[in-house]
Every structure is written in structure tokens, then in C-alpha cells.
Amino acid sequence: MDTCKITLDPYIMHFSGYQITTSGNEEFCEDIPDVGHTFIVLDAIDRSLRFMEISVKIVRNVDLLGVPDKDGEIIYHTPYNNFPTGSIRVEQTFTEPGYFVGIVSIKTPSGQEIISRFPFSVGMTNLWPVILKWCLIFLLMLSSAFVLWRWVEHKRTFSAG
């Protein structure tokens, strides 16, 4: 399953994030690793999207559940527009880490509005190596304590016998 796909039933777009100054050409699609200058590119996989009006918003995700009524402030907004190349480039500088929701809306030729929401984080992925390191240290200490306890029990049993 491609986690970089955004579904606007029945249409599909591709989401890519880039931070050229900190990560070069590395592509991100769920979590942007650092705060700072970021490019988000939305590419229409379905060619028919090139002829529809598309709007893009980025909002702070306040409740982490993605409930529309509880969205935080809008930090980026592109009003409805046509994108004949099928590519939408969003340039945003994230100043603090957090959770966000991208909202892509399209207006079909029949006038129907279709909305897709995709959550992502900024500057939060760097915590995983720290958490993993402390979990490994804890497991190492726990296993060492177990081995020491077994050794003491063995010595006590051997001495008593």
C-alpha cells in the first residue's frame, strides 16, 4: 500500500514533502522530519483532475483524530484553482513541531465537492531514535538484572547443598 496516495473517490493524488536545506532530495509522505522550509507537492495521478478546480489547506491538528470541527488554525490555504499541469506546489515554513492535517478539496464537473484529509507530523520523527535507545537500555538493564539474580540464586543453592 502506497501511503503517499491521497484518495478523492474515485480520484487519486500523490503527496510528497521535501526539505531541501536539511534532507536534500529525500522524499517524505507522512512525517516531515524537521521544522523549517518545506515543499509539499501534490501530483494528480488521474489526468481528469487537471480539468477540475482544486483547493489545498494545511491546518494544525488539535485533537489528533482529524475531526473537521476541531481543526486548529489554517496555516496555508490555496483557493480553488485549476492546475493544468496536474501538479500543485505548496511552500511552507514550519516554525514549530507538531501534528497537521492537509485538506485537498476538488470540485467535479458536475459541481460535487470531494474532500480528502491526510494527517502528517513535522519535527516529531526525530524522537523515535531517542525512545528506541532508552527502550534498549532498559531491556539491557532488565536482562542483566535477571542474569545477576539467577547467578545469585545458583550460588545460594550450590552453597546450601
Image (cartoon, rainbow, N blue to C red):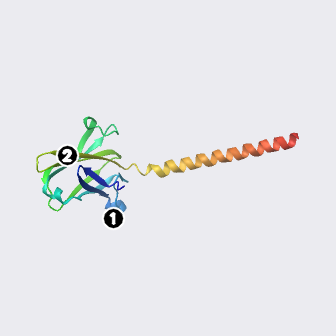
Q: How many marks?
A: 2
Extreme residue in the bottom direction: 25
Residue 104 vertical placement versus 89 (above, below): above
What residue type is disc 1 on?
A: Asn
Q: Find disc 2 in the rendering and name its residue.
A: 114
Extreme residue in the left direction: 110
Q: Residue at x 74, y 44 (%)?
A: 150
Residue 129 drawn at (x, y percent): 48, 52
Q: Residue at x 23, y 55 (%)?
A: 90
Residue 160, image quadrant: top right
Q: Is residue 82 left or right of residue 58?
A: left
User: Spatial distance from mark 2 to mark 1, Cα to Cα?
Assistant: 31 Å
What residue type is disc 2 on?
A: Ile
Q: Residues within 10 Å of mark 1 (few under 14, many from 20)?
A: few
Q: Secondary structure at mark 2?
A: strand
Residue 14 drawn at (x, y percent): 27, 57
- Seen from the viewer's position, the closer of residues 68 and 137 is 68
Residue 41, image quadrant: bottom left
Q: Which mark is residue 5?
A: none
Residue 102 drawn at (x, y percent): 27, 47
Image quadrant holding the C terminus, namely top right
Q: Secondary structure at mark 1?
A: loop
Q: Is residue 134 left or right of residue 83?
A: right
Q: Earlier in the sequence, mark 2 or mark 1?
A: 1
Q: Residue at x 68, y 44 (%)?
A: 145
- Seen from the viewer's position, the closer of residues 134 and 8 is 8
Q: Residues within 10 Å of mark 2 (few under 14, many from 20)?
A: some
Give the foreground label among 2 and 1. 2
Residue 80 drawn at (x, y percent): 14, 49
Q: Find disc 1 in the rendering and name its residue.
A: 25
